[in-house]
């Protein structure tokens, strides 16, 4: 037999074998593969104020229609218990996970449910001003496959959950099949964020504005200029000298600079860069009142160095006096932050203020003005040099 004929014969045998194996392969039902017979749901709650709150959910059984005709429509309600949080859970990002409760099925086939979040016990939504709840708009389709048992009953043979909308209510790269196990990789998840504006008090929804908020807003920064010598009663602070400030904002989880309608200074929205920094200028006796900043936002306030001035700051965060910040010399920047933790101060529900005082490098009129001292010394040195030169010339002429 020639090599060519042998090759053709072998190819025919392989093809016949492949066809035979293909006919012998079992046909897997939809949803087959890695099987899961239970499902867990995860609730992520971001809050900078400890809260007693429950979140509710709904699993709506789906019907045939719009190209879907393989669903069992016999009523079989799925129960999803409330997600419950208490003040004992504290603040930050809190995660809880629990099992979905399935009914006793009485018919084999595929059951499908749309799972959504429906509300919270505080009655808050994203329309509030002083406080709001950013509810999850995520949607999931949960397909439950039920099969017959050898004993003549029914059991869940597989559960597949697919994410169709994210927490903002849109389809994106996070949609698709998700993990429903009782573990950290669980993707059957709803995330909510409670937001309160800093400085609005412990009862932010009270119709009467908190007096502290009326005066100080979320954060108030003030500027005062004084003379270096308290005995110099003739000193008058310059009202034209400008002092440059940078305020860095690190917003808490689930929030950003637009969450409360934009951060404003004295009523005008300010620009906050991608690095979290905003810049502003203050003069003597000026104040800047920030509004629209969430509780829990970390702030770092830096005043740039300015010639002939030495700065200090009195700091109050959440109505608590913090360590004063004092420059060690003139023409030195000051930085208001938690120097121990090396992070910004967290704005609280109550008073948040930074009062900056700058001492001008002056002395009483009976002394030398420190501002002009270098120039006085230069003139004196020049005079000494000139006197020496003249004396030298005179001596030379006399010789």
Image (tube, helix red, strand yellow):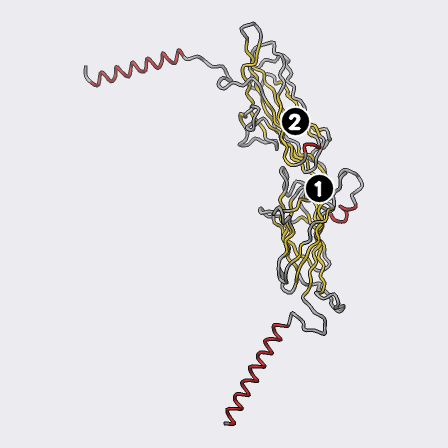
Residue 382 falls in image quadrant: bottom right
Q: Which residue is mark 2?
A: 117
Q: Residue furthest left?
A: 1
Residue drawn at point x = 55 percent, y = 81 percent: 385
Residue lying at 56% horizontally and 5% vertically, measured from the top left: 152
Q: Sequence-wise, which precedes: disc 2 or disc 1?
A: 2
- Percent across and percent down for residue 26 are 44, 12
Query: Disc number at residue 197?
Result: 1
Within the image, what quadrant is residue 53 found in? top right
Return the residue found at the far front. 340
Label 1, residues with CA under 10 Å away: few <14, some 14-19, many ≥20: many
Q: Quadrant of the N terminus?
A: top left
> Element type at marker 2?
strand
Tell me if residue 227 comes above or below residue 203 in the rendering. Answer: below
User: Residue 203: where, in percent of width, then height?
Assistant: 77, 38
The image quarter containing residue 165 is: top right
Residue 256 in sight from this viewpoint: yes
| Residue at the image position 58 percent from the left and 26 percent from the top | 188
- Where is residue 181 drawn, in percent x and y? 56, 23
In 3D space, how far apart are the residues under numbered discs 2 and 1 (Cα atoms)?
25 Å
For the residue pair 173 and 205, the one nearer the viewer reads as 205
Name the secondary structure under disc 1.
loop
Where's residue 379, x and y in %? Answer: 60, 78
Q: Which mark is residue 40?
A: none
The residue at 71%/57% (across/down) is 223
Tell me if residue 271 can be seen: no
């Amino acid at each position: 037999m020639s090599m060519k004929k042998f090759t053709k014969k072998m190819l025919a045998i392989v093809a016949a074998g492949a066809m035979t194996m293909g006919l012998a392969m079992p046909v897997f039902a939809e949803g087959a593969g890695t099987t899961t017979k239970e499902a867990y749901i995860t609730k992520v709650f971001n809050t900078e104020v400890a809260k007693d709150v429950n979140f509710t959910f709904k699993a709506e059984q789906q019907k045939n229609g719009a190209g879907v005709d393989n669903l069992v429509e016999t009523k079989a309600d799925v129960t999803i218990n409330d997600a419950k949080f208490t003040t004992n859970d504290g603040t930050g990002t809190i995660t809880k996970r629990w099992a979905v409760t399935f009914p006793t099925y009485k018919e084999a086939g595929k059951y499908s449910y749309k799972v959504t979040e429906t509300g919270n016990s505080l009655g808050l939504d994203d329309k509030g001003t002083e406080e709001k709840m950013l509810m999850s708009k995520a949607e999931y389709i949960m397909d439950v496959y039920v099969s017959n048992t050898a004993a003549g009953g029914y059991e869940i043979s597989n559960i597949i959950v697919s994410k169709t909308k994210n927490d903002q209510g849109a389809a994106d790269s996070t949609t698709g099949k998700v993990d429903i196990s009782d573990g950290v990789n669980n993707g059957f998840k709803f995330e909510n964020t409670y937001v309160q504006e800093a400085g609005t008090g412990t009862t932010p929804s009270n119709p009467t504005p908190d007096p502290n908020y009326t005066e100080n807003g979320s954060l108030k920064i003030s500027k005062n200029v004084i003379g270096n010598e308290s005995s110099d009663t003739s000193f008058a602070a310059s009202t034209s000298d400008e002092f440059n400030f940078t305020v860095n904002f690190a917003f808490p989880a689930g929030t950003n600079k637009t969450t409360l309608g934009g951060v404003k200074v004295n009523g005008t929205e300010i620009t906050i860069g991608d690095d979290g920094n905003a810049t502003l200028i203050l003069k003597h006796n000026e104040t800047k009142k920030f509004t629209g900043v969430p509780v829990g936002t970390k702030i770092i306030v830096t005043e740039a160095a300015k010639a002939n001035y030495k700065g200090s700051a009195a700091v109050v965060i959440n109505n608590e006096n913090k360590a004063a910040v004092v420059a060690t010399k003139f023409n030195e920047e000051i930085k208001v932050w938690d120097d121990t933790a090396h992070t910004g101060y967290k704005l609280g529900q109550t008073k948040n203020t930074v009062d900056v005082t700058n001492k001008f490098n002056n002395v009483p009129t009976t002394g030398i003005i420190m501002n002009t001292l270098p120039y006085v010394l230069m003139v004196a040195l020049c005079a000494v040099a000139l006197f020496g030169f003249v004396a030298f010339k005179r001596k030379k002429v006399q010789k």
